[in-house]
Image (cartoon, grey):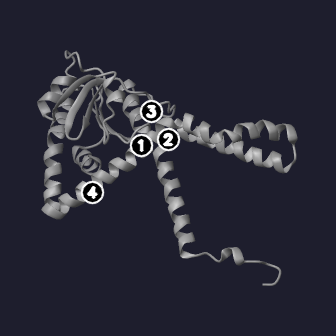
Amino acid sequence: MEGFDFSFLNLRFLDLLDIVLVALIIYYIYNLIRGTIALNILLGLVIIYAAYILVKQAQMRLLTELLGAFVSVGFIALIVVFQQEIRRFLLLIGRNASLQKNKAWWSFLFGRKEVVKNNSIRIKPIIDACKSLQKSRTGALIVFAKYFDEQFYQNSGEIIEAKVSRRLLESIFQKTSPLHDGAVIISENRIKCASSILPLTENDKLPPQFGLRHRAGIGITEMSDAVAIVVSEETGEISYAKQGRVRMNLSFSELEKLLNKDY
């Protein structure tokens, strides 16, 4: 059509690939921080930048200078504010690449059935322990960390470094045990530490019956790629937290499916 220039739509294949990759990165980052306070901070920074563009176009000099000073150090501010998220993002990329590589070789050498069988063997003592804890109404918090950050977890917990077993988990969470408060951290198919104090979620929309154990389980999944099992001391109900979201009143078959997928 005359009067309209559509030359900017002349996209190359690499341009389309570029757009798709950027979209994937944005989606991946969003999944990493959704449900956390970091998302609200990012939205605040976007609003400030949008306001800067508007006042600059409107030639409002004082506001332009004020917001411009903030925008000029925006990249440094992002690093300072999101240092934990950036660190976690980079660790997650490297860790997942390594895990997928190992899974691919394992599947190639031994087949998918062998992988599933091996995972079921790893999960069984955890399921059995949860059954026992539920029956005795013993509260528990078990965290599965894909990447074990020693400084983060061990600063507030006791180092265990032991094979995962039903009896060990039951012993840790017994009310007379000095380690029953806090969380057990499992990584690389080993109990790394116990009695770890975790950050609590700031989500104010959780059910009122959720106590510190549930809030700690949700909190750790908001700020890391870990997942958490929570056994309620009052009801024996099994809950499963992932990415700041929680599934309540799970059956053991549902719990096994979730662990098979995430653990």
Circle 4 or circle 3, nearest the eye:
4
Q: Earlier in the sequence, mark 2 or mark 4?
A: 2
Q: Gap between marks 2 and 4, in whole Å?
A: 29 Å
Labels 2 & 1 near each other (Cβ < 8 A): yes
Local crowd at mark 2 within 10 Å, few (<14), some, or many (≥20)? many
- How many dots with numbers? 4
- Label of residue 2 in the image: none
> Which three-letter amino acid code belongs to the residue tagged 4?
Lys
Badges 1 and 4: C-beta atoms under 8 Å apart? Answer: no
In the picture of the structure, the residue carrying the numbered disc 3 is 207
What's the mark number on residue 243? Answer: 1
Vertical arrangement, residue 105 with respect to residue 78, above or below: below
**Of the residues under marks 1 and 4, which one precedes in the sequence?**
4
Circles 4 and 3 in contact, beta carbons < 8 Å: no
- Between the residue at mark 3 and the residue at mark 1, the CA separation in whole angstroms equals 17 Å
Q: Position of residue 7 (x, y in %)?
A: 71, 77
Image-quadrant location for residue 113: bottom left
The residue that mark 2 highlights is 35
The residue where tag 4 is placed is: 101
Residue 129, percent from left and from top: 17, 34
Q: Amino acid at mark 1?
A: Gln
Residue for point 31% across, 25% down: 154
110 sits left or right of 249 in the view: left
